[in-house]
Amino acid sequence: MGVLVQESLLDLDEQPALGTLDGVAAEGPGQSGEVRRTPLARGAWVDVRPGWLAGSGEVFARLMETVPWRAERRHMYDKVVDVPRLLCFYAEDAPLPDPMLTAARQALNSHYRDELGEEFRTAGLCLYRDGRDSVAWHGDRFGRGRDHDTMVAILSLGTPRALALRPRGGGPSMRFELGHGDLLVMGGSCQRTWDHAIPKAPKITSPRISVQFRPLGVR
DNA sequence: GGAATCCACGGTGG
DNA sequence: TCCACCGTGGATTC
């Protein structure tokens, strides 16, 4: 396994999050503790904060246990196929399945509220059971209007998986390795001008959970 | 030669 | 009504 090794070094109660991402952070060995922003083409950017969430191992275990994971099926051409991951969506006013996720969302809002111009409200959880699970290239789009920038914050728990990004319409792709407790935020025009995916990784045999925080109206 | 990437397929839901 | 969306597997490229 080797998945649940990194435990929390900081407690939320000792370090309430107030306008900084550091509140929920655990300083992993050798980690900078800084949010690193990577500018992409066309006004998109990605923030990466390794080892962000304290107590990731316990949160991961609780989510595996308590979230009512749902399998979905969809028509793809001539057959019905399983969606290659398990899902659970928490709408704006639904209580999140773990207090650490509520705290994480608060910390994200403290840090990004001004830049985002609104708040992260919904949470979409995905369980990638092993490397055969994946998600194809897509952008998280708006129900309303397509000329409006937004952000999607992704908290990754469990087995590290690559998140791939490439310009919409084609172009060289880049990869971010998302490890246990890592945070990645896509912002600027990223959801309009870039696609992202979690590629299949057949050698991986253990699970990863991703938590995606979004403002209202972003799918 | 193995791995990563590309491509085409069409029913569904917004 | 219309169009963007998305998983698979075979082909192609790296």
Image (cartoon, coloured by chain):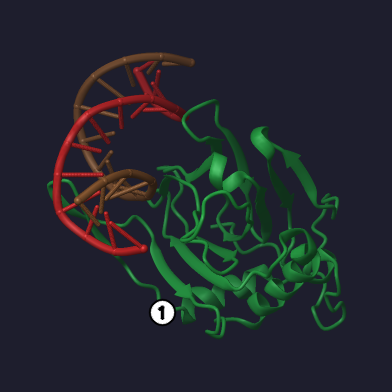
Chain colours: A green, B red, C brown
Q: Is residue A167 left or right of residue A180?
A: left
> Residue A216: image x %, image y %?
56, 69
Q: Residue at x 41, y 79 (%)?
A: A68
> Residue A26: image x %, image y %?
79, 65
Q: Residue at x 73, y 75 (%)?
A: A106
Q: Is residue A208 left or right of residue C10?
A: right
> Residue A135: image x %, image y %?
42, 50
Q: Residue at x 71, y 78 (%)?
A: A103
Q: Which residue is mark 1?
A: A68
Relative to the observer, which residue lies in front, A15 or A218?
A218
- Could you tell me the amino acid type at mark 1? Pro
SS for dot 1: loop
Q: Quadrant of residue B14?
A: bottom left
**Whether residue A100 is situated above or below residue A75 in the rendered picture:** below
> Can residue A216 be seen here?
yes
**Whether residue B8 is situated above or below residue A71 in the rendered picture:** above
Q: Is residue A70 left or right of residue A78?
A: right
**Whether residue A193 is situated above or below residue A130 in the rendered picture:** above
Q: Quadrant of residue A100?
A: bottom right
**Whether residue C12 is situated above or below residue A158 in the rendered picture:** above
